[in-house]
Amino acid sequence: MEIIFKRETSLGLESFEDLGFNSEEELELEISKLTKFRPEFDTNFE
């Protein structure tokens, strides 16, 4: 029997479990935290 080591590269196709999250909702919550607009960068041009 031959054992083959195969390493694949994907473009963001990992499951939430592979990324260390318990659910898709948990992953979405963390993504929303990272993409949330930070008020200290708000500039009013009025």
Image (cartoon, rainbow, N blue to C red):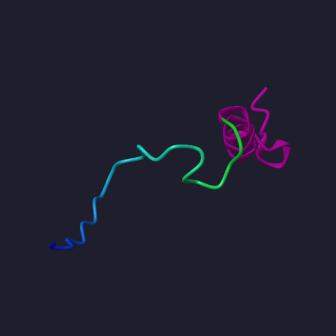
Please indicate whether residue 41 sits to the left or right of residue 14 in the image.
right
* Of the pair 29 and 3, the residue shown nearer to us: 3
Residue extending farthest right: 39
In percent of width and height, residue 25 lies at 71, 32
* Of the pair 25 and 3, the residue shown nearer to us: 3
Residue extending farthest left: 2
Q: Residue at x 65, y 55 (%)?
A: 20
Q: Main secondary structure of the magenta part?
A: helix
Residue extending farthest top: 46
The answer to if 31 sits in the magenta stretch is yes
Please indicate whether residue 18 sits to the left or right of residue 5 in the image.
right
In percent of width and height, residue 42 lies at 79, 40
The answer to if 35 sits in the magenta stretch is yes
In percent of width and height, residue 3 lies at 21, 73
Residue extending farthest front: 1
Q: How many marks?
A: 0
In this rendering, the answer to whether 41 lies above or below 28 is below
Q: Residue at x 68, y 35 (%)?
A: 28
- Quarter holding the N terminus is bottom left
In percent of width and height, residue 36 lies at 74, 39
Q: Residue at x 28, y 59 (%)?
A: 8
* Of the pair 33 and 8, the residue shown nearer to us: 8
The magenta stretch spans which residues?
Answer: 24-46
Res 22 → quadrant: top right
- Quarter holding the C terminus is top right
Please indicate whether residue 11 sits to the left or right of residue 32 in the image.
left
